[in-house]
Structure formats: structure tokens, C-alpha cells
Amino acid sequence: MPGVTPVALGSPDRTAEELLAVLRRVKGTRDPGLEVSATQAAELAHRHGFGLLAVVEHRDADPALLMAGVVPVDRPVDPALGVQLAGPAIRDVTKGVTATGYPVVIVERIPVTGSGAQLQVVVTDPARPRVAVFTLHSPTGRGWLDVAGLAGRFVSGMEFTDPGTRSASGRPPGGTSGRSAPR
């Protein structure tokens, strides 16, 4: 999908290197903070067994990191989950249905640590006791609505695959990978 560049999930070091290369290409800088962000994101993705790590970019925004994974749950998930979420860092909770028909809860957070923004999306699978959890994080928050909109279109097209696979995302009809998209 244009604007979403997946990063291969090899070893944590290799993942961090590839993620750093994408971030430097997008930001056009050698900011030392990018290396720290890439290393932390790669370690987090590997530690939690995420099936997706990607950079979301928009010309009017700083890049954001998108991570996702499928998580089994011990009982079917209630789509009304969103009404139970509250807290000072939560800006908005929205419930809906993806373009592929799955119930979804979207939680927008403003991290307690200060700058930036975070969006968490939980897509439930009515056929099996599992959820796909997507987390979009922008360290600066600049252009947040633009990158959140891109990530939302990406998530909206996701489809669950059979339980033996690690993929949490499907490609929306007619979509292209972020690498082949025009810049």
C-alpha cells in the first residue's frame, strides 16, 4: 500500500538495520534518535512475536512505526470492548467494522511521557478466539492525522488467515506495497 513500507523481521539486529535504513530514507537525516527508535522497535517486535513491522510515511508528516500481531484469547472477544477503556492518556475510542467485515476498536492515546501520539487498533475474529492488535506510534506527532489515516486504510483491508500463519495483515484490493509506490 502506498505510504506503508514493511520491514523484514529477521534477527533483531538485521530488522533494526533495515528499519533504520527506511527511516533515514524517509527523514533524510542521520538523527541519532532514529537509531535508538529502530533498535527499540525491532527488539519489541521480536520480543512479542509481531508479524508486521512497518514505517508509515506521508509527505506532510514525520514517519510513524506500525507494529502488528495476532494474539490468541482464551474466550471470544466482545466487540463492545471499547466502552470499557478509559484513562487520562486516552483521547478517543471508536468502534466500527473494517472494510473486510471484522469488528474493530480504535483507541487513540497521547502518551503520558509527553510528545508524540499512539493509535491502537484491535480487530476481532468472530470465527476464532483471537485478535489482531495494531499499534501506530509517532514519536513527534507531526502530521499525526495524515499517518493515522494511511495506517487506518491499511488496517481496514486486513484479513485473518488460518491459525498456522503469522500474518496479521491482508492487502486491500488493488493495493501496492509501499516499496513500489510512487513517492
Image (cartoon, grey):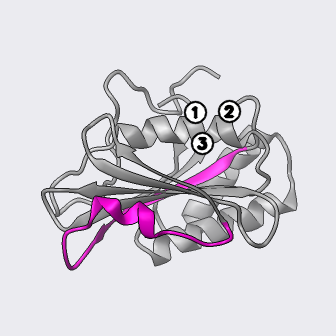
Q: Nearer the viewer, residue 96 or 117?
A: 96
Is residue 97 shown left or right of residue 147? left
Residue 22 sits above or below residue 180 on the image: below
Residue 95 sits above or below residue 157 on the image: below
Question: Is residue 75 within the magenta segment?
Answer: yes
**x, y percentage for residue 38?**
67, 62
The span shown in magenta is 63-89
Report the mark closest to the observer, 1 or 3. 3
Q: Secondary structure at mark 3?
A: helix
Q: Which residue is mark 3?
A: 148
Which residue sits at x=26%, y=46%?
Answer: 102
Residue 58's label in the rendered image is 2
Q: Which residue is mark 1?
A: 3
Residue 117 sits above or below residue 46 on the image: above
Label pair 2/1, CB-CB below 8 angstroms: yes
**x, y percentage for residue 105?**
41, 55
- Quarter residue 155 falls in: top left
**x, y percentage for residue 117?**
70, 56
Q: Secondary structure at mark 2?
A: loop
Precedes in sequence: disc 1 or disc 3: 1
Quadrant including the C terminus: top right
Query: Is residue 15 something one can see in this rendering?
Result: yes
Report the mark closest to the observer, 3 or 2. 3
- Quarter residue 3 falls in: top right
Q: CA distance from mark 3 to mark 2?
A: 10 Å
